[in-house]
Structure formats: C-alpha cells, structure tokens
Amino acid sequence: MTIQEKQQEVIEEFSMFDDWMQRYEYMIELGKSLPLIDEKYKIDENLIKGCQSKVWVHAELDGDQLVFTADSDAIITKGIVAILIRVFSNQHPSAIIEADTKFIDDIGLKEHLSPTRANGLVSMIKQLKMYAIAYQTQLN
C-alpha cells in the first residue's frame, strides 16, 4: 500500500466520527495498537526533540523499506505517532521524503491540538523524514 493510499485510509476512518472526542478516543486506541519500540531503543538519541511528552522513534531498514517503531509516555501523543508510523512505516525512504503530510490537515488534527502538541507533531514528522534521508543515502 502506498503512502497516499494509507493517508486516504486514515482520512476515511476519521471522517466516520462526528466529533473530536470520538476522534481522540480513536487515536488512543490506535496508540494502544502501536508496534512497540524495543526497550533498548528507548534512549535519549531516539527521543523526538520539540515534544512536550517523551516520544521515542526507532527506524531500521528491512530490504529497501524503512520500518519504524515508537512509544510515548502520553496516550494522545502515542496515538499521534501511531498514525504517522502507520502511514510511513514499511515504505521506501524516497517515498517518505517526497510524501506530503496534507492528510494531517484533512483530518483536522493540527487545529485540535494544543500549540505544544502541534509543535511535537511537526517535530515527529521532521524526524521521520530525517531518518528517511539518512537511510536513503545508504541505499544509493
């Protein structure tokens, strides 16, 4: 499944809910289903800078696909990173680098987050793309 197809899937899922309380509950559920990061990767260098909560993201190459795992100490933040990982994990680094994140606006996520969480969201996206850039150079 391409990044665009996964983004469309997320947009469709979020459109099923009438209000933001239901969407937050759904995000919390997504966070609970997040593929957990191995404890050995819960280190400072895997922490996302700019997040109010602690968010760890680890990336590794599986063939030519980048696979992400993550965790957070905050349930909403865990849901946010779960959405990002669902969209960007198991993709080629170049696809991650080129992907837009308009789907975040389409589901209305950024406007329903506190300013610090919105900044954290931007930091998470930036870090996933940085991992993709780093691994892309290894593939070339």
Image (cartoon, grey):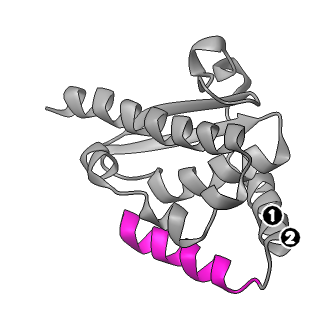
Q: Using the image, determine if residue 37 lies above or below residue 23.
A: above
Where's the N terminus, which quadrant? bottom left
Image position, residue 130 (x, y; %): 38, 31
Region of the chain picked out in magenta, as a range: 3-17
Q: Is residue 9 magenta?
A: yes
Identify the main secondary structure in magenta: helix
| SS for dot 1 | helix
Label 1 sits on residue: 24
The residue type indicated by label 2 comes to: Met
For the point 65% across and 29% down, the residue is 56
Q: Is residue 29 left or right of residue 47?
A: right
Q: Which residue sits at x=30%, y=49%?
A: 92
Disc 2: which residue: 21
Three-letter amino acid code at the position of disc 1: Tyr
Is residue 1 visible to the viewer in this orientation of the structure?
no
* Image coordinates for residue 20, horizontal then vertical, percent: 79, 71
Query: Residue 132's image quarter?
Result: top left
The label number, if any, that marks residue 136 in the structure image: none
Q: Is the C terminus in the top left, top right, bottom left or bottom right quadrant?
A: top left
Which residue is located at x 43 percent, y 57 percent? Answer: 101
